[in-house]
Amino acid sequence: RIHEPLPGEVRLQWWRDVIAAEGDAETGHPIADALRATVAVSHLPKAAFDNMLEARIFDLYDDPMPSRTDLEGYCGETAAALIQLAA
């Protein structure tokens, strides 16, 4: 939905803030509230979500992947992290 990098970075920061927030206060966003509840109930590491959101910043820009090592790191922080959390 985002076509410009800056609004995308703002949105990603909002998700970081929501996940990092302490307490049971609801955000009013049903997906965010469900994610926070799942993280709490399943004792999922918040750092994994923070790393994933940081890696996703790359998607906002139209830059080529710099190297194979960078691609492996990106895949490890995004798709592989989701698989590990699901397991």
Image (cartoon, grey):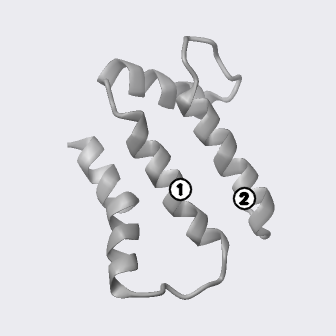
Residue type, label 2 = Gly
Viewport quadrant of the N terminus: bottom right
> Picture coordinates of residue 76 (x, y %)?
32, 63
Image side of residue 21 versus residue 71, left or right: right
Mark 1, residue position: 54
Instruction: Return the mark for residue 8.
Output: 2
Image side of residue 5 versus residue 74, left or right: right
10 Å crowding of disc 2: few (<14), some (14-19), many (20+): some
At mark 1, the secondary structure is helix
Q: Nearer the viewer, residue 31 or 13?
A: 13
Give the residue at x 79% y 57%: 7
Image side of residue 50 versus residue 73, left or right: right
Give the residue at x 29% y 59%: 80
Q: Separation of disc 2 and disc 1 at Cα? A: 12 Å
> Picture coordinates of residue 45 (x, y %)?
35, 34
10 Å crowding of disc 1: few (<14), some (14-19), many (20+): some
* Residue positioned most to the left: 87
> Picture coordinates of residue 13 (x, y %)?
67, 45
**As drawn, 73 above or below 78:** below
**As drawn, 24 above or below 6:** above
Looking at the image, is mark 2 or mark 1 earlier in the sequence? Answer: 2
The image quadrant of residue 5 is: bottom right
Viewport quadrant of the C terminus: top left
Residue type, label 1 = Glu
**As drawn, 67 above or below 38:** below
> Picture coordinates of residue 42 (x, y %)?
31, 24
Give the residue at x 31% y 24%: 43
**As drawn, 16 above or below 29:** below
Observer-side mark, 2 or 1, equals 1
